[in-house]
Image: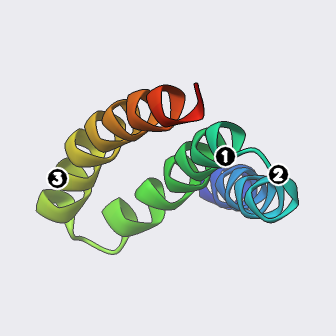
Amino acid sequence: MTDILFLIFSVIAVLGASATAIQKDPYDKLISLGVLFAGIIPFVAFAGYLDVSIAISLIIPMTTIILLQAVWRCGK
């Protein structure tokens, strides 16, 4: 069962990384980075760093929202 989950999270991380590399719009690039981090967080938790994964889970969405608003305002 864990092998299937590792495969799924690996696919999510690779899709996020490839989407980040392909996107030209900074707004879309930030959203793709969020997908990339969503695929990486379970690997950090599996390594035993639960405190780090909790911190990442709280920090990444907040900074993504703030950066998306900054990019949206600068793009106008």
Q: Which residue is mark 3?
A: 55
Q: Which residue is mark 1?
A: 32
- Upstream in sequence: badge 3 or badge 2: 2
Q: Which residue is mark 2?
A: 23
Q: Could you classify mark 2 by the number of other residues whose Cα lies within 10 Å: few (under 14), some (14-19), or many (20 or more)?
A: some
The image position of residue 7, as x and y in percent, is 75, 59
- The amino acid type found where label 1 is placed reads Ser
Residue 21 quadrant = bottom right
Residue 67 drawn above or below residue 17? above
Q: Could you classify mark 3 by the number of other residues whose Cα lies within 10 Å: few (under 14), some (14-19), or many (20 or more)?
A: few
- Compared across the picture, whether 25 is left or right of 33 comes to right
Name the residue furthest left: 51
Cα distance in 3D space between marks 1 and 3: 20 Å
Name the residue furthest front: 76
Cα distance in 3D space between marks 2 and 1: 8 Å
Cα distance in 3D space between marks 3 and 2: 27 Å
The image position of residue 3, as x and y in percent, is 68, 61
The residue at the point 53 percent across, 44 percent down is 34
- Depth order, front residue of 17/6: 17
The residue at the point 21 percent across, 40 percent down is 58
- Compared across the picture, whether 8 is left or right of 2 comes to right
Which one is closest to the eye, mark 1 or mark 3?
Answer: 1
- The amino acid type found where label 2 is placed reads Gln
- The amino acid type found where label 3 is placed reads Ala
The C terminus sits in image quarter: top right
The residue at the point 32 percent across, 61 percent down is 45
- Residues at circles 3 and 2 in contact by the CB criterion of under 8 Å: no
- Upstream in sequence: badge 2 or badge 1: 2
- The secondary structure type at the circle numbered 2 is loop
The residue at the point 64 percent across, 50 percent down is 5
